[in-house]
Amino acid sequence: GGEACGLQLRLGRKLKGVPGKWELRQHKQVDQRFGGIVSNARAAGTLLAVGRVGESVPESPQEGRTFVSRDGGSTWREAADVATVFDLADQGTVAVLADNVVATSELRYSIDGGVSFSACRFSDDLVEVKDVVSDPNATSPTLILHGQVAGSGSGMGYSLDFAGLFPRTCSDPDLAGDSGSDFEVWRPSAGPPGLVPALSEGCELGRQVDYVRRRPDANCAVGRAFAGATVARDCPCSLSDYECDFCFERHDEHPADRPALANRTAPGFQVAGSGPGSCHRTCGQEHPDGPPECEGGGGTYLRSRGYRKIDGDTCRG
């Protein structure tokens, strides 16, 4: 299956032949025809994926296209109009794509974190590409492309070294965000903006996390010396940090939407009442409202409030 998310189309134009819904469907699992979504802990926010614009994932590699995201998958833009194999290098500043559907002698690469791509001829022969890989930490600007010369059955490996495209090493990560630094601060947010204010402001699971990464317009290599930097802080608790408890579901103004909205957060969390966002019981008497009969007429008992903090949420207050 696929998952729908926002898609930033190439050159800002709508792709022809896709009426109605403008959604990106991605292949999440690796198989022999499609690669999975590629990301790396050292390449904050940058992802590569094969998918299509439409209501279903591509059934064949010929239907696939390659997309890149620089905001953790919130928006996507087309990187190639064919399905490819790909990987990230130099902590996400280098991205390499190679057509694995038909034999090729060219690849596409980016040295600005996926903002733009250029073509490069890597062989005089047509090559049936099998994969493109970088080192596991994606700290080197060098990748390996392996495959076989078309029709020969002879395996080949190509070293792709992009170090020569960078005149210097990036500097001043401790001043990230300043005009004199080669680095920027990126904060993930969960869209669409405006749905839940805390999420659009960058609070996810009760905390904000800022990542330091190279600016896309800085023509420099990050290299191995920079180990990455993050700054995390807990957010004040808000309604988005809570969900309906077991045996409770969210009450919505539109009953037809309840199955899809069950146990999700919304403004107006409350147990009593019938307004939007109230959590109402769905399990009958599994959790009786009244107190149990206590021996001697005293004691205490536990009772659900109907809502609870989302597991893993670290909000305060």
Image (cartoon, rainbow, N blue to C red):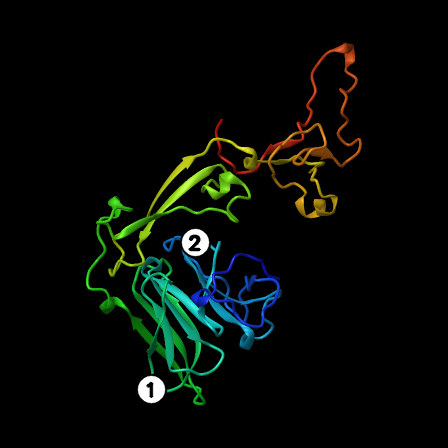
What kind of residue is marked 1? Asp
Instruction: Give the distance between the C-alpha atoms of the residues marked 1 and 2, in whole angstroms.
Output: 36 Å
Q: Which residue is mark 2?
A: 71
Looking at the image, how many numbered discs can be counted on the residues? 2
Q: Residues within 10 Å of mark 2 (few under 14, many from 20)?
A: some
Seen at 19% across and 60% down, the residue is 168
> Which circle's residue, 1 or 2, is located before the other in the chain?
2
Specify the farthest residue to the front: 13
Can residue 227 be seen here? The reply is no
Quadrant containing the N terminus in the rendered view: bottom right
Secondary structure, mark 2, is loop
**Position in image of residue 207 (x %, y %):** 45, 38
Residue 46 versus residue 99 in the image, above or below = above
Q: Which residue is mark 1?
A: 124
Seen at 45% across and 34% down, the residue is 235
Q: Residues within 10 Å of mark 1 (few under 14, many from 20)?
A: few
Specify the farthest residue to the left: 168
Tell which tag, 1 or 2, sits nearer the viewer. Answer: 2
Q: Quadrant of residue 210?
A: top left
**Position in image of residue 316 (x %, y %):** 48, 29
Seen at 49% across and 79% down, the residue is 101
Can residue 82 be seen here? The reply is yes
**Position in image of residue 303 (x %, y %):** 69, 25
Residue 41 versus residue 121 in the image, above or below = above
Secondary structure, mark 1, is loop
What kind of residue is marked 2? Asp
Q: Is residue 298 left or right of residue 64?
A: right
- Marks 1 & 2, CB-CB < 8 Å contact: no
